[in-house]
Image (tube, grey):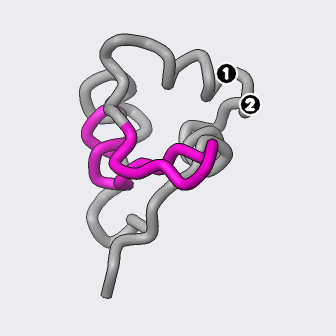
Amino acid sequence: MPTQLLSTADVGRRLDVSRERARQLIASDDFPAPVQQVGRTRLWDPADIERWIGEHRPDDVRRDDELP
């Protein structure tokens, strides 16, 4: 089954932050690059986001069985 990619809004929900705060984090140099862009919408692989969370917000890491 293909991986469900995450939009900026999805990233914000996963990080439990506003969409604006998600945009700020996404703009930082250490945030993963999107894996795809459709029009103006950038999309991320959930595994990349989880890896970033593990490095920058370890208390928010989900176990494999909790991934969407």
Which one is nearer the viewer's eye here, 62 or 68?
Answer: 68
Question: Mark 1: few, some, or many residues within 10 Å (few <14, many ≥20)?
Answer: some
**Displayed quadrant of residue 16:** top right
In the rendering, at what x and y percent does residue 29 appear? 35, 12
Q: Which of 15 and 25 is in front in this view?
A: 25
Q: In this view, does 40 lie to the left or right of 62?
A: right
* CA neighbours of label 2 inside 10 A, class few (<14), some (14 to 19), many (20+): some
What residue is rendered at 32% in x and 72% in y? Answer: 65
Q: Distance between the residues labelled 2 and 1?
A: 5 Å
The quadrant of the rendering that contains the C terminus is bottom left
Q: What stretch is highlighted in magenta?
A: 34-52
Is 36 covered by the magenta stretch?
A: yes
Q: Is mark 1 on a helix, strand or loop?
A: helix
The residue labelled by disc 1 is 21
Residue at image location 43% in from the left, 38% down from the top: 60
User: Residue at the bottom extreme?
Assistant: 1
In the displayed structure, 39 sits above or below 60; it is below
> Mark 2 and 1 residues: CB-CB less than 8 Å, in contact?
yes
Give the left or right position of residue 47, taking residue 16 as reference.
left
Three-letter amino acid code at the position of disc 2: Ser
Q: Is residue 33 above or below residue 20?
A: below
- The mark found on residue 30 in the picture is none
**Figure check: 37 above or below 52:** below
Residue 66, x across and y down, in percent: 40, 66
- Report which residue position mark 2 lands on: 18
On screen, residue 31 above or below 65: above
Location of residue 57 by image quarter: top left
Residue at image coords 33%, 45%: 50
Q: Position of residue 17 (x, y in %)?
A: 67, 31
Extreme residue toward the front, this view: 39
- Percent position (x, y) of residue 25? 52, 20
